[in-house]
Image: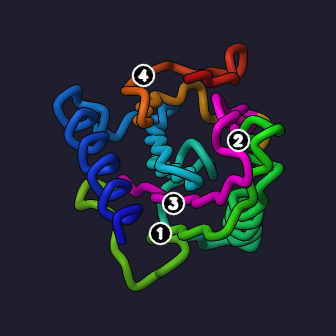
Amino acid sequence: MRLKGVLFGLLTLLSTVASSHGLGAHVHGVANLQVAVDGDTLTLVLESPLDNLLGFEHLPHTEKQKAAVRDMSSRLQKNDAVFIPTPAAACRLVSVKLESPVLSPEKKTDGDGHADLDGEFVFHCQHPEVLHGLDLMLFDGFPHLRQVDVQVATAKGQTAAKLSSARRRLDW
């Protein structure tokens, strides 16, 4: 129970920091990533406009758009295709939660037609003492994505970074 309480506190703190810096804004080309390390658990929370991941933000109408949604979901569910924690930490993806109007058509887009994808990725690390970074491979599969604004909270403190296709490595 202590682990979940500390993790919740870290994620709440990250959310507060992100909100106070305006990181929650819907900006095409830019996504937000919150990283929390608590003991042997690495939690990543991704928020991105759908345009970054699909090239559109409405419910898919054509077969090509439906295939793009399936491809996006599949890519994000694959541990080695998106987030690569420090290899020596032996982190294993244990859960992925994706929420978006394109994945759940009963959910509506914002009144202005903008829609996001929210994802939560939880890893269990066998050697968390050597976990000190993450390679972000999102740029490979999602060419509309130009920048990821990152907030990190660990037992050692907090940090922030801006990642791009030219700078994919996050160290903490």
Q: Position of residue 52 (x, y in %)?
A: 57, 42
Q: Does the magenta run of residues contain 116?
A: yes
Task: Of the two numbered discs 2 and 1 on the same chain, state the one appearing first in sequence.
Answer: 1
- Amino acid type of the residue tagged 2 in the rendering: Phe
Task: Of the two numbered discs 4 and 2 on the same chain, state the one appearing first in sequence.
Answer: 2
Q: Which residues are magenta?
A: 114-139
Q: CA distance from mark 1 to mark 4?
A: 24 Å
Q: Which residue is mark 3?
A: 120
Task: Of the two numbered discs 2 and 3 on the same chain, state the one appearing first in sequence.
Answer: 3
> Horizontally, is 137 left or right of 112 in the view?
right
The reply to whether callout 4 and callout 2 are in contact (CB within 8 Å) is: no
The circle drawn on residue 142 is 2
Q: CA distance from mark 3 to mark 4?
A: 19 Å
Q: Which residue is mark 4?
A: 160
Quadrant of the snapshot with the N terminus: bottom left
Q: Residue furthest left?
A: 20
